[in-house]
Image (tube, rainbow, N blue to C red):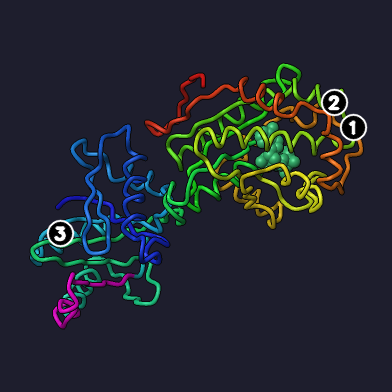
Amino acid sequence: VRQVVVVHFDEIALKRGRRAYYEKRLVNGLENCCRDLGPPGIRALFDRVIVSGGKTEIPVAVLLDRFSRVFGVRYLREGWLTGTSPELLREAIDLVIASRPDARTFGVRVKGGQRSDLNRRSLDLAAELGAYVGGRTGWKVDLGSPDLWIEVLLDGAEALVSGRRVEGPGGLPIGTTGHGVALVSGGIDSPVAAWMMMGRGLRLSVLHFHSAPFTGRQSQAKVRDLALSLARYQPTIEVAMIPFAELQRALVAATPPRYRVILYRRFMLRIAEVLARAVGATCLVTGDALAQVASQTVENIGTIDAVAGLPILRPLIGMQKSSVVDLARELGTYEISIRPHEDCCAFLMPDRPATATTPAELTEVERDLPIAEWVAAAVAAREVFTTRFEDGLASSDSASA
Ligand code: ATP
Ligand code: MG
């Protein structure tokens, strides 16, 4: 009897033509999250993927925990691979029973690899094993929504008996829809936005603008910790820190105060686009929600987007703040995001920002600015490091770009 994890896909099953590709990426996701532990043993059985601890005997509890954060996984079941004799099946079922002492109701399903196996024998076997479970535990049968489904898959001389279920995050495997750059501020919203887009299959790099030394270094420490938290879902994340204060001061000296935030955002996007193209990313991700602050009115979003040559994805645009906060709490980023920091955009901020600008207005405001030169200077001043999830903890290496 060999203990394994049974992986059930999310939407992958729907993408008929590209199923093989998505499956391969999902398997990469399962391998990547265990890179520090040695390769797990991965194989297919019918439409399931079965994972054992591999040569290094990774404990199944560790696999269940890590796989519960691999996008594309809908749910997992703890299972046992064994033979098909009644004694072996019962032995495996005893292990399933022991894994859910809190259950009160159960159902047994028996499936064969071939359609022709779904015959009388399967039904008889399900009834027989059901009677066995009922006798052992006193649990009641419920074929609607039992506390515990016990699933028996038969394939030749082999049987897979699975039980306890652990939910995955669902979505699409990371990397299947492309590569993006997420602008992460240290606030509550942007890490949630990044996580949501990872869940739609984007592999993300993280970009942060800070105003040190004119503000403290807290925002950078926060973004580092937020990246560590996101690395539980995408095990390797590149993070770039951009010193923004010089550019801000230059803008402040050359432009009217009411446009400041819009100008900061337009320059952030220009810089982000250069960095995105340099790493082959094809979209940007931000945590904007409509009308949450002055820079997020429909008009100002239009004015900000006008400078971008890449699509800007804003997964939170129609969400209520309380839902974003709930997600941040679940994700574990909330506690990091609420730590105090000095926002780079509060630095040199006017009391009354413009709430309804047009692209033409801003083009005029920026007319005499050496835009390309300032963007290039900011890009050149970046610091880049990589965040990795390992040993159940994330760590970072510094490396200059
Ligand atoms: P957040 O909670 O993510 O800070 P917010 O609702 O406070 O968002 P803003 O501070 O106006 O809104 O920022 C809007 C978006 O612009 C952020 O979600 C983020 O994607 C990006 N952004 C703002 N400031 C920075 C920064 N210093 N570095 C990187 N991205 C930033
Ligand atoms: Mg903010």
In the displayed structure, does residue 380 sit left or right of residue 213? left
Q: Tag 2: residue type?
A: Val
Q: Is residue 90 positioned above or below 322 on the image?
A: below
Which circle's residue, 2 or 3, is located before the other in the chain?
A: 3
- Given residues 245 and 307, the one toward you in this image is 307
Residue 186 seen in the figure: no
Seen at 43% across and 31% down, the residue is 388
Residue found at the very far bottom of the displayed protein: 120
Q: Where is mark 2, residue-wise? A: 252
Per the model, the C-alpha gap separating discs 3 and 1 is 74 Å
For label 2, being within 8 Å of ligand 1 is answered no
Per the model, the C-alpha gap separating discs 2 and 1 is 7 Å
Q: Nearer the viewer, mark 3 or mark 1?
A: 1
Seen at 68% across and 38% down, the residue is 269
Seen at 69% across and 26% down, the residue is 210
Q: Is residue 267 positioned above or below 75 on the image?
A: above
Q: Where is residue 343 in the image (x, y as percent from the top left)?
A: 74, 30
Is residue 110 in the magenta section? yes
Which circle's residue, 2 or 1, is located before the other in the chain?
A: 2
Q: Where is mark 3, residue-wise? A: 91
Q: Where is mark 1, residue-wise? A: 257
- Is the residue under label 1 in contact with that under label 2 (CB below 8 Å)? yes
Question: What residue span does the magenta drawing correspond to?
Answer: 106-123
Q: Quadrant of residue 393 in the image?
A: top left
Q: Is mark 3 on a helix, strand or loop?
A: helix
Residue found at the very far top of the displayed protein: 213
